[in-house]
Amino acid sequence: IKYIASIGKARFDDEVLKREQRALFESIQHVDFGRETKTNLSLFGGMKFAAGETTDEWNDFSLVAFHLSKYQFDFINKVFIVTDLIENIDFDTVIEEVIEILNNVQSIDNVAPIIPEISKSKDLFVKGWKQLVEKTIAKLNDDFVKVVLSRQRLLIFKDNIDANYLIGNADKDTTNFTIYFENYGTVFVSKTPERLFKIEDNTLFTSAIAGSAPRASSNEEDKANQDYLLSDDKNRFEHDLVTQDIVMNLKQYSSDVRFSEQPHILKSNFIYHLESKIEAPLDEGYNLFSILDRFHPTPAIGGFPKDQALKYIRKKEFGARGLYASPLGLIHEDDEAEFAVAIRSMFIKDRSATLYAGVGIVKDSDVEAEFEETNVKFKPMMELLGVNDESQSTLD
């Protein structure tokens, strides 16, 4: 992965980030070939779930960072962009490198990938996690309403995990956002159904997504699960919390926030969620980074109230979240942007993959039901790796 330039900080400062973003884009001299396009240069990146996390596996990723890559492909508008100093560009070399990149992409479908062979699979800290959920349920009250608790599954393979195998599998699922973030030899992958927000034509589009039920093999059971999700008090309560929090946060940036009163079913490969669509024309002079900081984390991935839930997560959870449940996405030159929330995700280093899954804990949660829900949420990454979830061992 070749980054020409980056902006980033060890702490989040929306005004500094805005100045650095503007300075970076203004420093770029555009040279085209007489073809008008709608394509803009983009920065890719985002932020970790929370500041102050110090575990070694996430050291290669900054708290907040956005990168300008050397090559950018817009397959919708059929545009290829090279970002580099004019004096550094040798078009023969560029063409050779691009052909190699495209051949590698094409070979994913034409060459048999190396299917990873698993040697060990462990659910981490199961006993401790269940005890934490039980204690959390007892702690919740009218002032501390909800907290999302995540857990991890460790997979170790006999050989290094083949990137082409992952990318090929990821392309089979077109219902979710695909994130493949490589940095210094470590890789973060997510197949997430959840968009944090999209800004287009100075209007912010987002969704409140919370509450879940598993998909079933039979149509009858599937319909029953959807009906249950739409009518269940716990799931509706979680969903309403997320909706109200997003609407409240948006009112700082818009005088006209619109949202659907009744949620509908959002379908993913293994699970259903409740979703309510929200949109808001943004007031002039908004700071994109301020919106990002204000939105993250929503009650769907952090809890409510936000600050209390974050403090609880940092103190009580087993291990750091890093980029799990963090906002990752694109910022374009014209200030349009799109961010997804990196749930259904994993961290890959050499032969190991650490999978993440979380659930919203409220006063009437059931420990075993929440544990089973995390098992369902591990499935997208298990499928991406080409392994099943049988014979899981535990490590406490």
Image (cartoon, grey):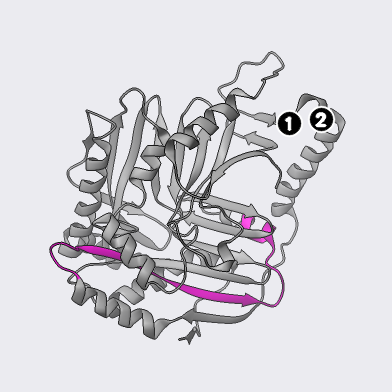
> 68 or 338, which lies in front?
68
Rendering quarter of residue 360: bottom left
Q: Which residue is mark 2?
A: 88
Amino acid type, callout 1 = Asp
Residue 16 x, y percent position in the rendering: 48, 36
Discs 2, 1 touching: Cβ within 8 Å = yes
Secondary structure category for the residue under label 1: loop
> 18 or 355, which lies in front?
18
- Please say if 95 is above or below 49: above
- Residue at screen point 45% across, 60% down: 52
Rendering quarter of residue 30: top right
Residue 170 x, y percent position in the rendering: 57, 55
The answer to whether 117 appears left or right of 346 in the picture is right
Q: Which residue is mark 1?
A: 84
Label ID, residue 104: none
- Residue at screen point 24% across, 76% down: 366
Quadrant where the image shows the C terminus: bottom left
- Residue at screen point 57% across, 58% down: 188
- Please say if 129 is above or below 174: below
* Residue 288 at least partly seen: yes
Residue 185 x, y percent position in the rendering: 69, 59
* Residue 217 at least partly seen: no
Please state the extent of the stretch shown in magenta in the rendering. Answer: 140-167
Q: Residue furthest top?
A: 34
CA separation in Å, label 2 and label 1: 7 Å
The answer to whether 284 appears left or right of 5 in the picture is left
Secondary structure category for the residue under label 2: helix
